[in-house]
Amino acid sequence: MGDVVSSHLDEGRREVITARTRDVMKEFSGVYEQQYAVALFNSVRFEIEGGGGPQSQLLHRKDPLAGRSIFSGSLFQYLEENRKWRNRFVSVPNSYTISLYESKAAHDRGLHPRGTINCAGYKVLTSMEEYIELINTSLPGVKAKVGSNPFIKCASQFPLVLWHPFARHHYFCVTTEKEQKKWHAVLQDCVRHSNNGLSEDSTVQTPAFTDSVRLHRQAKGHYGTWDMMCGAPPQILANLVMETLHPELRSVIAPRLRGKMQQRQRHWMLISDALYKQVLSQTTSQYEALAEACEAQRAPLDGRLRTDMDQIIASKEHVSSKMRALVLPKAEQLLRTNVQPYISSILEALMEPTSRGFSEVREVFFRELVEISKNSLNGGGKDKLGDHMERLSMLALHPVKMQSCYEKVEQLNLEGLQQRFDVASPSVFVSRAQILMGEQMDNAVYTFEQLLNQSLENQGEDDMCKTIQRCQDRVLKKYDYDSSTVRKKFFREALLQIIIPYMLQQLSPSCSPELPRFKELIFEDFSRFLLVENMFEEVVLQCVSKDIMMAVKEAAVQRRHNLYRDSIVLTNSDPNLHLLGETPQVDWAAKFGGDEPEGPVGGGGGGGSEGGGSGSRRRQVVSMIQLDGVPLPFESCLEVPGVELIPEEDAEAFEGMEEDRVEDEEDLGPQEDPKSPDSVTGIRDLINPVVKLALPVSEENPGDMTNGTKPTTGTVTWADGEQEEVTHVTTTVEDVPRTSPRDKTSPQTVVQQPVGSVEQEAEEEHQEAAAIMDAIEEIEIAVQEDDSERVAEGSAEESDCEPSTAPPLASDSSSRGDSGFQSPASVGPDEGEPQPITNGLDAEDKVIDPVEVEVVLA
């Protein structure tokens, strides 16, 4: 396929791409240099004047993913080079970049991956129908039929596709629906965190970059939200270039593509990927040079700002007052007629799913704490507590456990408002809310860890349950307050993101021509820090903020979504708690599990070497454990329940584990170490074991045998010398189809044994037969007692009542299938196969049918 790319992206066209990228970056650089100085002014002013919102009540973990990886496992990848599916070992480190290896051994040896995927800008699809719908938009006029595969034939019915509007697509598949759901959650988490590539800790570079991108797009007439604001700055700039370059080249190249519909789509994808890579390489190098140049000027700019801060602020207020006189009348009129009627509906659309998501976060966190309390009530020791706390510390980073929370927010729908306010899609707000939910979960977990560790050090481990409850109550109250604060801030920012671009778009035609005259009012020395474009936006923002703040306050008063009122402000309410934030993070595995073996568990190899210490075996947040030496279907990453220390196992998954265990046993074969029974019936069967025997019933009087349970007395001696008492004999009559005389074995071939020889032969076979066979024979002898005369007579009536009237029998193959056991007396001396047994000692007696008898042991 390289010839297709080279023929359509020849040297001349690549030079055009380079020139276009350079022009866009030159325009952006001019805007960025201006916005960098403005952002530095705002940062220094905030530092000097202070202020800010209410103080957070929960502690913040500095580096949640220190020493951990997210996930590792195996799946199938489609290789476009040879159009074949190959098994790949996938590792997701704490950078959320997917690494693909030839095998797990290659990963464990530290070899370079065969490929890496940065998930910024991607979408995770779980069906080929979704993929085809997106592919149909890639080339105008080229449409695939519904239900047809564009390029590939999926190896299973559980695909996973990573789709990008510009870059290469990646195709994976797994063998079970459970795997698909888990992989989908992990891949979505990779996309979510990769999209969030702008650091919030950078108070100058990040706001300068975001404002520059927004102003650059506004200069091109693109107002409103942008769903390709994804990834690190070079990736966002590449998307900015591709926003205009991609459709232009598509209109030129698409008519020249030849072949069938699927082939043309495939060729265009390869061309688009090559185009995106070229643009990305240029934006990366040029942005790095731009950032270094601006950082080099930071020190002198910072010095000038701190020296002239008062004069700069006074000059800004003077110009802003003049600008408000021009802008406010127009802005207020637009606000009353076109914005205010829709604020409440926009807010309601945002609040409903977001509040459900944060409530689900609280519920998931609470369930985990309940499990820890149950462990302490049930006498769980230090090891169990350490294990539970280690799992709890990974909760916010666990995409599978957090998936139920994230799904609530994905229901956010702004349909009907998107066209009016130029909102590209709600994905921008969904991703932001999900990031905030993860942060709040981690804050709650970290605060609980620090409080519990402090309580255990001060009070010891006595009455641990009450200690856990006290810490739980404190953390939940703080979570409720912080959750309310974070949500209200999110609602205000989202409303501004929706309304401000619309206001600017409507006001710019009339106000922008008037802005240059305000530049004359700014001193030249301050002109780098005061830009009239920014002040114009601030005036519009101040006009809208009052209505937005009022709408959020009214929502908080209604208490529909568990929002605290702004009058309830907790400032330094727990100063001792914030002192704990300076203490190191608790290593629960080392604190309570010091004697655990080191090394990763099963498929968790990606995180084992990073964690170190005794807790390294659980350093992977999500595990797909596979048993060593057990072949898995297609070498797929099936999760095997029952393995200890699987981080994602919790109480909610316990009900489904039994079904998974049965399915896995069918796939993996019999297990060597059976688990304890979980049901009451299973425990009762262990206390009062039931032994099933197949005994004959007379053909002459078949109606004499009836169902029922009769008490009896007797003892049985087991192989280890212990004696058990027989309390009940339950008779169950089953209808077995009779065979014709010609199908039955002739009496001459029946093995005959006197009763007296049965006991002698039982001793000889004691060393060879299994323990269960000896136990069955001892049961029969104990119940028989001294009734050997009735055995010799072969009385049909007594044989209906007593199970000891004949040696242990298994008449034919159907008998063995019913009873489940095989008597030593029915085994031939040569071939070891069961032989038909008669109901007496005479060779002329007929072959009899079995009944099932249950002997209940006390």
Image (spheres, rainbow, N blue to C red):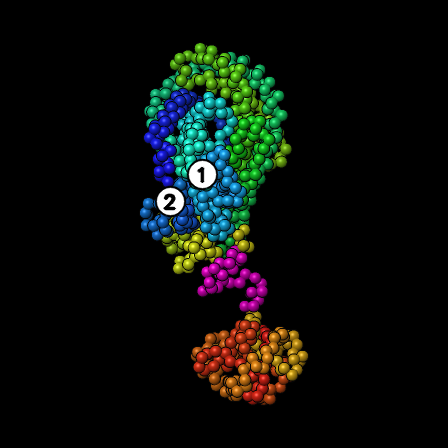
128 over 711 or under it: above or below: above
Quarter of the image with the N terminus in it: top left
Q: Residue at x 60, y 18 (%)?
A: 333
Residue 482 at x, y percent in the picture:
53, 36
The three-letter code of the residue at mark 2 reads Glu
Mark 2 — residue? 81
Is disc 2 placed on a helix, strand or loop?
loop
Residue 677 at x, y percent in the picture:
53, 63
Examine the rendering and report whether any part of residue 664 can be seen.
Answer: yes
The three-letter code of the residue at mark 1 reads Gln
Q: CA distance from mark 1 to mark 2?
A: 16 Å
665 over 276 or under it: above or below: below
Which segment is the magenta one?
657-686
Residue 110 at x, y percent in the picture:
32, 47
Is disc 1 placed on a helix, strand or loop?
helix
Q: Residue at x 55, y 44 (%)?
A: 363
Specify whether residue 291 is painted magenta.
no
Q: Residue at x 32, y 47 (%)?
A: 111
Q: Quadrant of residue 633?
A: bottom left
The image's mark for residue 265 is 1
